Amino acid sequence: MRIEIERAHRDDESEVFHLVEQNHLPLAGLYEHFETAIVAREDGGRIVGTAALEMYRDGALLRSVAVALDVQRKGIGHQLTDAALALAHELRAPAVYLLTTTAERFFPRFGFEHIARTDVPPGVQTSVEFTSTQIERFVRASGEGKQAGASADGRREEKKGVGDVVTHWVKQLSGNPMW
Ligand SMILES: CC(C)(COP(=O)(O)OP(=O)(O)OC[C@H]1O[C@@H](n2cnc3c(N)ncnc32)[C@H](O)[C@@H]1OP(=O)(O)O)[C@@H](O)C(=O)NCCC(=O)NCCS
């Protein structure tokens, strides 16, 4: 299987949305930021992975990192994350933020550090990922069984619903000034 990582085209929308939903990630806000979405295309055809950036004046939000269930654990998530970070750098974001309930052990390998929600800058916090009730519902659905509590670095994780934990992460991009 040959995988090409590239910027998404508008006609990729339905496939991308399907993939994001299949992985139980929220769709709210994705359409508005589709211009900075990335896809992994299998042999020039089927879309097997996605990632998207929401660009704000004080940072980028990495979201919708999702790989088709039948091709997970083959390095595609890694390639998508690398490509999204490269795009954020190219677009001169000073830092890349993300929130997750599902992949808190995946992102540290790219240099993301665990932060408190209050450390996310105000521009990035305007994202629907922070404000949407859809996300609240998603968090409740996907976080089932997790226990809120102190993380490894001693910070208190945020409890959003019954037993759900959202963690926030940042990767600074050196050399990029604030917009
Ligand atoms: C997280 C995700 C994008 C990783 O994509 P992938 O193509 O399967 O990952 P890769 O093959 O590039 O990387 C595999 C490595 O990541 C680890 N990994 C994959 N998913 C992980 C997860 N949810 N948590 C922790 N580690 C994970 C694997 O253990 C593997 O580690 P190894 O290299 O030490 O063996 C994919 O599992 C996915 O779509 N998950 C559902 C959606 C999601 O949770 N997205 C993140 C929130 S935005």
Image: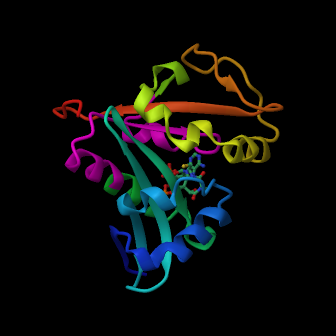
Q: Quadrant of residue 37?
A: bottom left
Residue 69 shown left or right of residue 40 in the figure: right
Up the image or down, 120 lies above or below 100; here it is above
Between 107 and 27, the one lying in front of the other is 27
Which residue is at 81% across, 31% downward?
Answer: 163
Could you tell me which quadrant the C terminus lies in?
top left
Q: Residue 154 location, x and y as percent?
A: 58, 13
Asked if residue 89 lies in the magenta stretch, the reply is yes
Could you tell me which quadrant the N terminus lies in?
bottom left
Which residue is at 79% across, 32% downward?
Answer: 161
Residue 119 shown left or right of residue 100 in the figure: left
Q: Residue 145 location, x and y as percent?
A: 82, 38
Asked if residue 41 lies in the magenta stretch, the reply is no
Which residue is at 53% across, 31% downward?
Answer: 168
**Residue lying farthest left?**
175
Looking at the image, can residue 135 be seen? yes
Up the image or down, 95 lies above or below 158; here it is below
Q: Which residues are magenta?
A: 84-113
Between 76 and 62, the one lying in front of the other is 62
Q: Residue 23 location, x and y as percent?
A: 65, 61
Q: Residue 53 location, x and y as percent?
A: 40, 51
Looking at the image, can residue 104 be seen? no
Q: Quadrant of residue 150?
A: top right
